[in-house]
Image (cartoon, grey):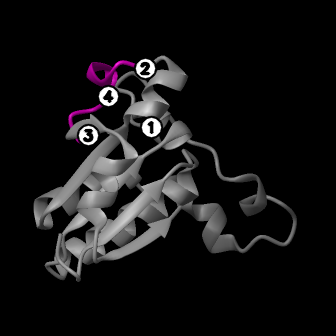
C-alpha cells in the first residue's frame, strides 16, 4: 500500500466510534488516499446484516455527566451511509478479522456487503504497510 494510505483498526461497535471511523474513512477517500479498515470484535458485530440498521448506543464515556453535546448527537448521524459514501468516493477495503469471526461465532456471509473479505492480522498489516494506522 502507498505511504499516503489510512488504515483503521475498528474494534468498537458504539455509534460514536463507528461515526468517527466512517468520517475519517470518507475524508481520506475524498482526498484520494487508499483506506483499509479492519473490523474486530464489537465493530465486526455492528456490520452483521441482521444488526447493521440497529440503533447503536454511545460509548460509556460519551454519556457520563459532563460529556459534550456534540458527542451525544452522534447517535443520529448515519455512520452506515458515511461508510457507503466513502466506498463510492475512493479506494476503500473493509476486512473482517478472521480471529474475531471465530471468537464471536459469526460466519463472514452474515456480514453486510460493505465488508469485502475476511482475513488475519498479517493480511491487514501487509495492506497497511507504509501508511498511517489508527485504532478506534
Circle 3 sits on which residue? 115
> Could one spot residue 79 in this view of the protein?
yes
Q: Secondary structure at mark 3?
A: loop
Q: Which residues are magenta?
A: 106-114
- 124 horizontally vs 63: left or right: left
Residue 7 drawn above or below residue 55: below
Nearer the N terminus, badge 1 or badge 3? Answer: 1
Considering the whole magenta stretch, tell me its main secondary structure: loop
Spatial CA span between label 3 and label 4: 7 Å
Residue at point 32%, 53% (across, down)? 124
Circle 1 sits on which residue? 44
Circle 4 sits on which residue? 111
Disc 2 vs disc 1: Cβ atoms closer than 8 Å? yes
Spatial CA span between label 2 and label 1: 9 Å
Residue at point 61%, 73% (across, down)? 70
Nearer the N terminus, badge 1 or badge 4? Answer: 1
Disc 4 vs disc 2: Cβ atoms closer than 8 Å? yes
Disc 1 vs disc 4: Cβ atoms closer than 8 Å? yes
**Residue 5, image x, y percentages:** 24, 75
Disc 3 vs disc 4: Cβ atoms closer than 8 Å? yes
Examine the structure image and report whether residue 111 is included in the region drawn in magenta: yes
Amino acid at each position: 500500500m502507498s505511504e499516503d494510505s489510512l488504515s483503521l483498526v475498528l474494534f468498537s461497535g458504539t455509534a460514536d466510534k463507528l461515526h468517527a471511523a466512517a468520517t475519517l474513512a470518507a475524508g481520506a477517500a475524498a482526498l484520494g488516499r487508499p483506506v483499509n479498515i479492519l473490523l474486530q470484535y464489537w465493530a465486526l458485530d455492528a456490520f452483521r446484516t441482521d444488526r447493521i440498521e440497529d440503533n447503536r448506543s454511545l460509548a460509556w464515556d460519551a454519556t457520563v455527566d459532563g460529556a459534550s453535546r456534540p458527542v451525544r448527537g452522534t447517535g443520529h448521524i448515519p455512520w452506515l451511509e458515511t461508510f457507503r459514501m466513502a466506498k463510492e468516493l475512493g479506494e476503500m477495503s473493509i476486512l473482517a478479522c478472521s480471529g474475531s469471526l471465530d471468537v464471536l461465532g459469526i460466519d463472514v456471509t452474515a456480514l453486510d456487503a460493505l465488508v469485502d473479505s475476511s482475513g488475519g492480522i498479517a493480511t491487514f498489516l501487509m495492506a497497511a504497510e507504509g501508511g498511517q494506522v489508527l485504532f478506534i
